[in-house]
Image: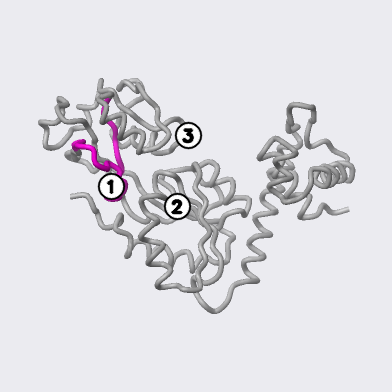
Amino acid sequence: MTPSIKQLRYICAVAEHRHFSRAAESCFVTQSTLSAAIQELESQLGVVIFERSKKTVLITPLGDRLLDQARLILGDVEDFVSLAKIHNEVLAGEIRLGVIPTIGPFLLPHLLKDLRKNYTKLKLYLKEDLSSQLYQQLRQGQLDLVILALPYALPEMETISLFKDEFLLCLSPGHQLEKSKQIKQAQLKGESLLLLEEGHCLRDHALEACKLEKTESDLIYQGTSLHTLVQMVANGLGVTLLPAMSVDADVLGDTKLQLRHFSGENVSREIGMAWRKSDPRREEYLLLADFIKQNSSAAKSIVK
């Protein structure tokens, strides 16, 4: 007997949450319904996908392989549904957009206002998460598009560059680097550098852009947001790197912090958009990418 789409969604939900009750909630069914459907699937296939105990849910080696296939199938199903919903109008209907935390709050507010004005029938549903989670949701068909910082490994996805986002050095008044009108990358060696915690791609992109190894600076603090890093700098705990789009969106607030450009080679990250290669709405996504390039203040080199 062929597995149902619901059964595939259920096993993917359990794999994501590692908890049957939370997986059931995410699928809007009771735990007994979800558990029965998964047990039926395992019985039909003659396999064990999950090892169950009172405290943990483990995925078997074969279960891992089956889940990979299930995610691909669900992605194809979403593409199938999207194709059926496409109308003659461009940028109409629903688009589920994922964005990372170091881009979303700074890029989207003004952009969404312009989009609503120009494409009145477009409904954007937003999800903010780390790059790794957004990629998995895109792969599984839970998202249509993601906006994130490149380079980032995105197998089976098509990507397009939107714009460069310059990194600026943020330091407190009186810091020894304040006298420098422009900063050389080598000047950061040995500095107390405040960065986001592991999992945020901005961390790795910042180190790469400044050509720093993790051992060449004193990473004394790992923050969860750019606003937190700004406050740490304001309290004299070190320096940090801020994307230009966040500065334009007033991430510094009423602090008296100083900003410095880097000299020589451009120190920046690349902002890009990605979608599944199989998605039939490719032309619409390209149109949306062009709209972002033309209408986003971040794409116009905002920090002078």
Quadrant of residue 286 within the rendered picture: bottom left
Q: Residues within 10 Å of mark 2 (few under 14, many from 20)?
A: many
- Magenta-drawn stretch contains 44: no
Does dot 2 land on a helix, a strand or a loop?
A: strand
Which residue corresponds to the image point at 48% horizontal and 54% vertical from the top-left? 274
Amino acid beneath label 2: Ile
Magenta stretch bounds: 238-258
Mark 1 sits on what residue? Answer: 250
Q: Residues within 10 Å of mark 3 (few under 14, many from 20)?
A: few
Q: Is residue 164 above or below residue 292?
A: above
Percent x, y for residue 19? 71, 36
- Magenta-drawn stretch contains 243: yes
Mark 2 sits on what residue? Answer: 147
Amino acid beneath label 1: Asp
Residue closer to the observer: 104 or 167:
104
Which residue corresponds to the image point at 47% horizontal and 50% vertical from the top-left? 99
